[in-house]
Amino acid sequence: MNIGWILFALLFWFAAWGLNAFLVRVTVRGRARRMAIDLVVPVIFGVTLLVLWEALVRGLNVPPVLLPPPSLIWERILLSIPNPLWPDFQQTFLKSVLIGYAIGCSVAFVTAIAIDRSPFLKRGLLPVGNFVSALPLVGIAPIMVMWFGFDWPSKAAVVVVMTFFPMLVNTVAGLNATGQMEKDLMRTYAAGYWQTLFKLRLPMAWPFIFNALKINSTLALIGAIVAEFFGTPVVGMGFRISAAIGRLNVDMVWAEIALAAVAGSLFYGVIALIERAITFWHPSIRSGRTR
């Protein structure tokens, strides 16, 4: 045991804790300064976790095969960006995740409109959707591999199944969130179903829809990676994790995990930015801008 590393971890933790406690209490004027502080606080917290990880692993002499330090993982990332991290990212994220996400969310959105239009579909499809959402991923993935082959289409199919139901349920709930008073007002203007849908009900449903899009951004990545455990070409994040852990190449496993975490976080962030631009009128967005 190396006491120096452990003492360094404790001192760094208390220093970062004090700095963040000061930043969250400080009063600043201006939106730009407030946004800068809101960005700095989580960055400091994330750096603190990495420093603690590094110091405790080295201080407690944890074997790298059990938990490598972040410095070793970073070195592996730098050495593996051209190959295999970039090909794995292309196979898993650019093909399986994005294509499956787009198909699953768009089909669910159209289905929600059809359900809203037809009470028969509402009574028939929603129970089926509940059933499909309860299917285990480890049971769906092998079947999709048998149906669509070992390449990315089978992983995209798994993503479609995983993203369909959250989008469907949230869109239906959003379409039903419009109050009766607003509907009556549209009727007084002689607005038909489609006019009411596009000018009133869909704008009211945007927060629900974006909530589903953000949830699906993480579900899609998880589904694609897990699906690759059940059959894939010799490329992909899931394949690399499975192959590397079999060789006890733990730093490569963590490098792929870090790549997936960064990709998923950026994907979620892009959707959140689009949400802020479209639903700028929503009270939650307006209160965040006027702080």
Image (cartoon, rainbow, N blue to C red):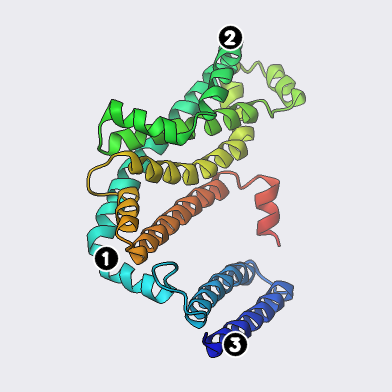
The correct choice, above or below, for 38 with respect to 99 in the image is below
**Outermost residue, right side:** 181
- Return the residue nearer the eye: 16 or 249: 249
Sequence-first disc among 2 and 1: 1
Label 1 crowd bin: few (<14), some (14–19), many (20+), radius 10 Å = some
Answer above or below: position of 45 versus 221: below
Q: Amino acid at mark 3?
A: Leu
Identify the mark at residue 7; answer none if there is no mark.
3
The image shows residue 164 at horizontal and vertical percentages of 48, 30
| Nearest to N terminus: mark 1 or mark 3 | 3
Q: CA distance from mark 3 to mark 2?
A: 66 Å
Would you name the residue on which mark 2 appears?
Answer: 120
Please name the residue that numbered disc 1 is placed on: 80
Q: Tell us which disc is closer to us: 2 or 1.
A: 1
Depth check: give the residue in front, 17 or 137: 137
Residue 284: percent from the left, percent from the top? 68, 49
Mark sitting earlier along the chain (3/2):
3
